[in-house]
Each structure stands twice: as C-alpha cells, then as structure tokens.
Amino acid sequence: MSLPRIAVDAMGGDEGVRVMIDGAAEARRRHDQFQFLLVGDETRIKAALDDHPNMRGASEILHCDDVVGGDELPTKALRRAKTTSMGLAVNAVKQGDAGAAVSAGNTGALMAMSKLALRTMPGIDRPALAALMPTLGDNDVIMLDLGANTEADARNLVQFAIMGAAYSKIVTERDLPRVRLLNIGTEENKGFDRLREAAEQLQDATGLDMSFEGYVESDKINRGEVDVVVTDGFSGNIALKAIEGTARFVTDLLRNAFTSSIRSKIGFLVSRPATELLKHHLDPNNHNGAVFLGLNGVVVKSHGSATAGGVANAVTVAARLLEEDLTQRISTGLAELHAREEATFDNSAAK
C-alpha cells in the first residue's frame, strides 16, 4: 500500500525518544513501506536512529526540544502548540506534511491540540476517544468515548455509534459490526433518557452499516458478544480503568499464588504455556493505539508506558486507518443518517 508518512511525537511518553524510535523502527520492519516525520530533539533522535539502519532512508527529522509535560493542563499546553513536539506532529497532519500523527504524551493536551488544529468533521458535534480491548471472541471490542467528553447527549451517542462502527469495520472486517450502548441493564426501560432516546434512533436507523443490538452491561464488554460499545467519556473511562485494574489484579494474584510454595512453583512450570498465553492476551501493548474519532485527520494516542512493540502497534493502527480511509467511512455513515432524518421529517410534514 502507498501511504502518506506518519508524524511521530518522539518526545512523548514515559520513556521518551528511545522507545518511540524503537517502536517506529519495529513498525517499519513489519511494513517496509512506512515513512516517518520524527518530531523532537534532533540530537537525541539521530542517536536513537543509529541502532536502526532500516529508518535512515524512511525518516525526516523536524527539530523541536519543547515538550508537553505529562501533568500539564491542556489549556496551558495549547499556548505552546506551535513550539512543542506534540503540537508540531499534529500540525504536520493539518498542513498535509503527514497523513497521521502518533503521540504517547499527555492525552488531554493531545485532544485539545488535535481539535484546534484539525477541527471536527462536518456532522460531528464532538470527537471521541476510541480504543481496542481484548475479548473471549475472535475479535477485539472497540469502546468509545473513553474520556474526551465527560457528558454526551443522545445525538452525540448516535454519532459515536456511527464512528465506532466505521472503525470496527476496518479492524474486525465485519460488514455489520454489532453495536450496543453501555447501560446498567439490558431492559428497554433502563438508564437515562438520553440512552433510551439514542437507542430508539439507532433502532430505527435501517440504512446504517451496523447491527444495533440494544444495551450491554459492563460485565459483558469482554465476552466477545459485541464489536462496539458506546457510552459517554465519564462512564467509559471508569469502565476501562476497572477492566484494566481487574486484569492486573488477576495476573498479580496468579503470580502470588504460583510463588507461594515449592509445590506452587512446580505447578507454575507445568501450566506456564497457559499463563504465558494469558499474559500475552492481557498485555495492553498488544492492543495499543487509541484513536481520536471525528476529526479531519488521523491522530493516534499511544499509552504513555508502552514498550517499543506497543508503539509499533499504535503506528500500525494509524497506517491502517489511512489505508482504509476511516474519515470517508465516517462521512458515508453520517450522510446515511442525515438522509434518514430528512426522510423522517418529510414524512412527518406530509401528515
């Protein structure tokens, strides 16, 4: 595939330049057509590139030594959007110097800069943060919003569903992704008015490329029975952190159990293939790469503590969304929704 290059904020994340360059290099070993704009301190980037000859002809460096702090307020970071590695990486997408931006830096600052530079797509009121999570099924589940919007009305939730379904079609390759709204029960009368209103709109939206299946409770998110879980950013962020915390709890519990006695250690050796498979399945690096959906451009957020492999996965997510033209898919879904709304209005007026 022929792709625009990917702008990498080389200064973001817990480990900084070294792991970001290692990750970009690993992504290029997987897909040797990737090209990069590496944004950050030129001296440090060049030193990191010494270990990766496969990056020499595939990378351009944009020097910048100003970095957004991990705890920096988004409003403060916005004032330095033109001088920081994060801001310049996003601006490269705006200017057409890159097709997508990848950063492991401050999530709030990245969202604020991305919204300011790229603006929301026509027909989208608010962008949303979407991420992949493992399930017991054949495919990962996409969940949104995960923190971009603490509140969301019915209109926002319907738009989130359209964006999530478009993303899901790319990563799951399902023609009609199974979409559900996160709720405290599956009965039709459960939840806030905005949830019930969004459910009614999605249930009636026969032209959309999704299979809307009502509500899902939080304990069923990872069962493999749904492809897209839609909620507001407040609830989504709580659910995500609860799932991640439970995964860490289980792995720590198993580790403690297997090291509690000689007999347990022997049992660990016997069951090691199974525990390694579990570890691999729960490793967030294997699902790294949250996406800001609804913008006029592709921006991917890597986890701040991601390994080189995790960064490589985030870069690969960005490239795949470019290849599959995510923004056009979302536009198509919005057009179908708008056409249905106009038809409904015309029918009501005729009566």
Image (cartoon, rainbow, N blue to C red):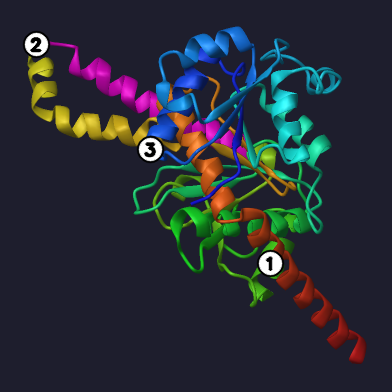
Categorize mark 2 by other alpha carbons within 10 Å: few (<14), some (14-19), many (20+). Answer: few
Q: Amino acid at mark 3?
A: Arg
Between marks 2 and 3 in the image, the one whose residue lies nearer the viewer: 3
Which disc number belongs to residue 262? 2
Q: Amino acid at mark 1?
A: Thr
Closer to the N terminus: mark 1 or mark 2? 2
Horizontal side of residue 329 vs 18, given as left or right: right
Q: State left or right for residue 322 relative to residue 159.
A: left
Question: Callout 3: helix, strand or loop?
Answer: helix
Instruction: Say above or below: 343 vs 183.
Output: below
Characterize the local packing of mark 1: few (<14), some (14-19) or many (20 or more) Cα atoms within 10 angstroms. Answer: some
Query: Looking at numbered disc 2 in the image, what kind of residue is underneath it?
Result: Ile
Determine whether 68 is above or below 325 in the image.
above
Image position, residue 4 (x, y; %): 61, 43
User: Label 1: which residue?
Assistant: 332
Q: Residue at x 64, y 48 (%)?
A: 231
Magenta segment, prevailing SS (helix, strand or loop): helix
Task: Specify the quadrant of the image occupied by residue 82.
Answer: top right
Residue 149 seen anywhere in this rendered image of the structure: no
- Under circle 2, the secondary element is helix
Name the image quarter holding residue 96.
top right
How far is the residue under mark 1 from the one under mark 2? 60 Å
Mark 1 falls on what kind of element?
helix
- What residue is drawn where x is 84% and y is 22%? 75
Give, as a single range, the part of the protein colored magenta.
Answer: 236-261
Q: Which residue is mark 3?
A: 30
Where is residue 214 drawn, in percent x and y?
A: 57, 64
x then y, percent, for residue 249: 38, 24
The answer to whether residue 253 of the structure is visible from this angle is yes
| Residue in the image at 43% along x and 23% along y | 308
Q: Residue at x 19, y 18 (%)?
A: 258
Label 3 Cα neighbours within 10 Å, binned few <14 / some 14-19 / many ≥20: few
